[in-house]
Image (cartoon, helix red, strand yellow):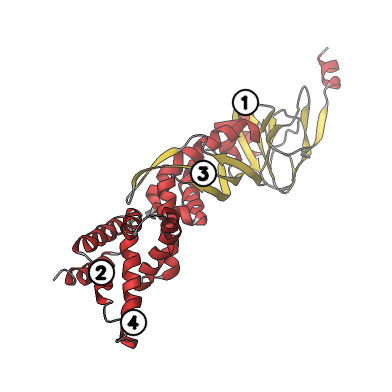
Amino acid sequence: MALMDFIKKQFIDIIQWTEDGDGTLAWRFPMRDMEIQNGGQLVVRESQMAIFVNEGKVADVFGPGTHKLTTQTLPVLTYLKNWDKLFESPFKSDVYFFSTRQQIDQKWGTPQPITIRDKDFGAVRLRAFGNYAFRIADPKLFHTEISGTREEYTVTDVEGQLRGLVLQNISDAVASSGIPFLDLAANQMEFAKALREQLDPEMAKLGLKIESMTVQSVSLPEELQKILDQKIGMGMVGNDMGKFMQYQTAQAIPKFAEGGGGGGSGIAGDAMGLGAGVALGQVLAQNLQAGLQTHAAPVAAAPAVAALKPEDIMATLEKLADLKGKGILTPEEFDAKKAELLKKLV
């Protein structure tokens, strides 16, 4: 009976895996009642790795290439089985293949707005989404920590865990980067880099490695988006205070025109409500003063128009202080403009 059982056994000469679809990370070679012929071949293709597991222990890891399976090439198995090196015999062991190619276009996103802390704005709620690519870097660790003894383990099986890791680490990525939030929001490549650096050690614990990370969109609360737009506009005009006042005026003119109607005092009140009336008056006064220097006689009464009231100057100072608090003006710029305006109160 024992002889018949031996004759019925099937021996494996070649062990290999050709992936038949996308998304498979780990695949167990079907052994059934078959045994590996001593001297057989293990074929591991590029973008693959293989491990032998014997009696629950990882015996060896093989990279790309064709490997002849003997007691000399499997010293760990030899030790576990207490084989004599002169004794050639078939053996049985679980063989797992792992795909090490990049798994691209993996989506991540924030289903609900998440709260992060920023040194300039405190608590900020945002939405973001993008994609990333990863690969198996340590098949032994991935086998022991994630895929285990399953016949097949796919990207779908692990994507929920990875997406959760991304969301969990967004806040820490922003904090550890030391980059102001508005700069991260305006530069999505910096945001993606900070997020990837935060995720690298977490992915390594699973035997994985992130190859690329993208942030495709960051949605800010409306009030922060306005500040970001203003900061971008200021970056276009530089730190020149004259250009700053012109920029503020250009921003205010459409809303000023929408206010329409009424007498001069009503229009001025609408402009002040927009926080730009004084800036508009400043620019008009400067233009008028330049005209006075060229044509002094025809406009002798103009200085009364160009003069600013004390309450207008104070309103301007309050607006500039608010801009400094939001990081749009530097302290030096604020102090220079403050000194200029206070002289007009004397």
> Which is more N-terminal, label 3 or label 1?
1
Foreground label between 4 and 3: 4
In the visual, does 329 lie left or right of 5? Answer: left
Residue at 67% x, 46% y: name it: 101
In the visual, does 315 lie left or right of 200? Answer: left
Image marks 2 and 3: residues in contact by CB distance under 8 Å: no
> Which is more N-terminal, label 3 or label 2?
3
Foreground label between 1 and 2: 2
CA neighbours of label 1 inside 10 A, class few (<14), some (14 to 19), many (20+):
few
343 vs 183, nearest the viewer: 343
Instruction: Work out whether residue 277 can be spotted.
Output: yes
The image quarter containing residue 339 is bottom left
Q: Is mark 1 on a helix, strand or loop?
A: loop
In the image, residue 34 sits, relative to residue 344, either above or below, namely above
Disc 3 marks a residue whose amino acid type is Ala
Residue at 62% x, 30% y: name it: 157
In the image, residue 50 sits, relative to residue 338, either above or below, namely above
Disc 4 marks a residue whose amino acid type is Ala
Q: Mark 2 sits on what residue?
A: 337
User: CA gap, disc 2 to disc 3?
Assistant: 38 Å
Q: Residue furthest left?
A: 346
> Which is more N-terminal, label 4 or label 1?
1
269 vs 117, nearest the viewer: 269
Q: Mark 1 sits on what residue?
A: 55
Q: Mark 4 sits on what residue?
A: 290
In the visual, does 131 lie left or right of 170? Answer: right
**Placement of the N terminus among the 4 image quadrants:** top right
> Which is more N-terminal, label 3 or label 4?
3
Q: Is mark 3 on a helix, strand or loop?
A: strand
Disc 2 marks a residue whose amino acid type is Lys
In the image, residue 296 sits, relative to residue 19, either above or below, namely below
